[in-house]
Image (cartoon, helix red, strand yellow):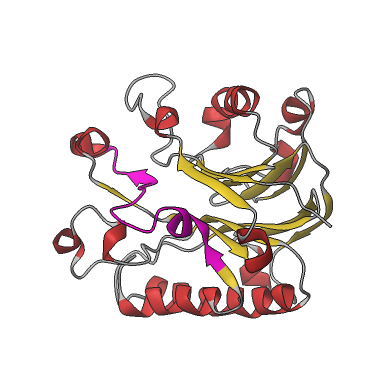
């Protein structure tokens, strides 16, 4: 199975780019973030035409997450368990069963600035995610939690730690929140396959030629249960999907993270 995650920063603006990429790469399951679409505007037909079933959770104003799959898509579950009204409005988490794997697409809040109400809300959201993932992982099946976590796990995951002093995405509190997610029984499979840094980076600022200078961050992650992590044979960032960075049809500021899995046995 080929599993991928991609913050597309507006699916309406990049639908053709995404569908062409799916066909070209043979990806089986793709988690999307920042679709910025309402559920009734999601282009399910366009994905259906190339053989993919879809589930989407979005309100059309911001955020929005989706899962597209050509290996089955069952039991779509938007939001947290027992989600509050304010959390439903955020449209940041969606789970479904695809090819025997519980796949979760997540878009963790940005946090904006350290100490702000948005930063504190990010830490609360991470704890809500931990509670749901602990229950899911305790069931003992294959789990893949993929998405834009807006956290660089450690200093290897930013191009220059000094450039991020005092900023979000790198604080001890955010990294501790991510650590508690991993403690649910999950493995950061990009780091498993690429034990040395830097990166592999998944996000680059549009400004100042950051992509071409290699000034990125690794904030898009695939966290897999230990049983699924044992099947991982390749993890790569598709930099080609990010290269054309200006002009009409410009790509997202994120590149797809691609995970290749051996078939399940037994």
Query: For the view shown, which residue lies furthest in the left direction?
Result: 162
Please determine whether, in this image, residue 89 is positioned above or below residue 50.
below
Residue 137: where, in percent of width, then height?
Answer: 70, 74
Which quadrant is the N terminus positioned in? top right
Quarter of the figure with the C terminus: bottom right
Name which residue lies at 35% across and 27% down.
243
Residue 106 is drawn in which quadrant?
Answer: bottom right
Across and down, in percent, residue 263 comes to: 74, 47
Give me the residue at 39% from left, 64% from top.
151
212 w.r.t. 151: above or below? above
| Residue 93 in sight in this render | no
Residue 14, above or below 10: above
Q: Quadrant of residue 30?
A: top right
Instruction: Report whether 46 appears left or right of 151.
Output: right
Q: Residue at x 46, y 76 (%)?
A: 179
Where 134 sits versus 28, above or below? below
Magenta region, residue range: 187-206
């Amino acid at each position: 199975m080929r599993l991928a995650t991609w913050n597309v920063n507006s699916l309406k603006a990049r639908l053709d780019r995404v569908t062409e990429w799916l066909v070209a790469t043979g990806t089986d399951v793709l988690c999307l973030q920042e679709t910025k679409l309402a559920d009734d505007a999601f282009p399910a037909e366009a994905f259906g035409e190339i053989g993919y079933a879809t589930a989407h959770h979005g309100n059309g104003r911001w955020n929005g997450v989706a899962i597209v799959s050509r290996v089955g898509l069952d039991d779509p579950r938007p939001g947290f368990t027992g989600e509050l009204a304010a959390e439903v409005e955020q449209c940041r988490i969606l789970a479904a069963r695809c090819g025997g794997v519980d796949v979760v697409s997540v878009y963790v809040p940005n946090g904006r600035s350290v100490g702000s109400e948005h930063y504190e809300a990010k830490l609360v959201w991470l704890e809500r995610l931990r509670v749901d993932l602990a229950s899911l992982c305790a069931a003992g099946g294959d789990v893949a939690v993929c998405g834009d976590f807006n956290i660089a796990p450690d200093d290897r995951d930013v191009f220059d730690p000094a450039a991020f002093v005092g900023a979000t995405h790198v604080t001890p509190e955010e990294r501790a929140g991510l650590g508690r997610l991993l403690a649910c029984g999950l493995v950061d499979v990009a780091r498993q396959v690429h034990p040395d840094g830097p990166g592999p980076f998944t996000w680059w600022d549009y400004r100042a030629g950051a992509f071409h200078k290699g000034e990125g961050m690794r904030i898009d992650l695939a966290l897999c249960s230990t049983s699924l992590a044992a099947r991982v044979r390749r993890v790569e960032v598709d930099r080609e999907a990010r290269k054309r960075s200006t002009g009409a049809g410009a790509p997202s500021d994120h590149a797809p993270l691609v995970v290749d899995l051996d078939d399940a046995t037994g």
